[in-house]
Image: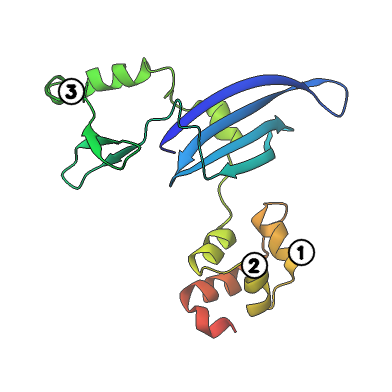
Amino acid sequence: PEHADIRKRGAASAGGGSEVRHIMTGMANGILLTVVHTERDRRTRIISARKRRSMSHGNTIRARRRSDGTLVQVLPDGTTTPLEDKTDWRRLREMSDAEVHVAALSDPDAQPLTEADMGRMRRVPRVKTLRRALRLALEEFAARYQIPLGTLRDWEQARAEPDQPARAYLRAIAGDPSQGR
């Protein structure tokens, strides 16, 4: 996202205990996104996701990068004014790889992933990647390739894995999508 604000808050869970809810707000392609999620049973669960096209203009700076690479502020009347670049690019270019590594580790917002973090993360199932590459909705993919909708959902949500014949069929679809019809 172009901008992100991450907050945590405690909330009562259905089981009577408490859980930590993560609230993330960010901008992507001019759309303000707010996602609330929690971790249950070592899985991330999205509680809500909302998008808004408009933002409060009182505390928002609209910016755009010009084709020459300069960053400009877009004013309410549509004109632009250059934004001050506070980055010391010469100093950054002169840093050694070791200095860059130390600086990256000192950034609290960009810490490296731990083994526990990696263990909680899951890959996007390949069938979902294939479906998106073909620009098909879940229902369209299921109908076109005669795969039961529930089975396809289970594969995409990693509740089940395709068996060997299904994997071969998915490879054939990936190789020549027109032949799977």
Disc 1 versus disc 3: nearer the observer: 3
Q: Which of the 4 image quarters holds residue 90? A: top left
Q: Is there a contact, CB below 8 Å, between mark 1 and mark 2?
A: no
**Looking at the picture, does residue 47 appear above or below residue 160?**
above
Tell me which numbered mark, 3 or 2, is placed earlier along the sequence: 3
Classify mark 1: helix, strand or loop. helix
- Quadrant that contains the C terminus: bottom right
Disc 1 versus disc 2: nearer the observer: 1
Give the CA separation, mark 3 to mark 2: 51 Å
User: What residue sits 56% from the left and 51% below the top?
Assistant: 124
Give the CA separation, mark 1 to mark 2: 18 Å
Give the CA separation, mark 1 to mark 3: 52 Å
Disc 3 versus disc 2: nearer the observer: 3
Tell me which numbered mark, 1 or 2, is placed earlier along the sequence: 1
**What residue type is disc 3 on?**
Leu
Residue labelled with disc 2: 164
Classify mark 3: helix, strand or loop. helix
Residue labelled with disc 1: 150
Q: Which of the 4 image quarters holds residue 81? A: top left
Residue labelled with disc 3: 92
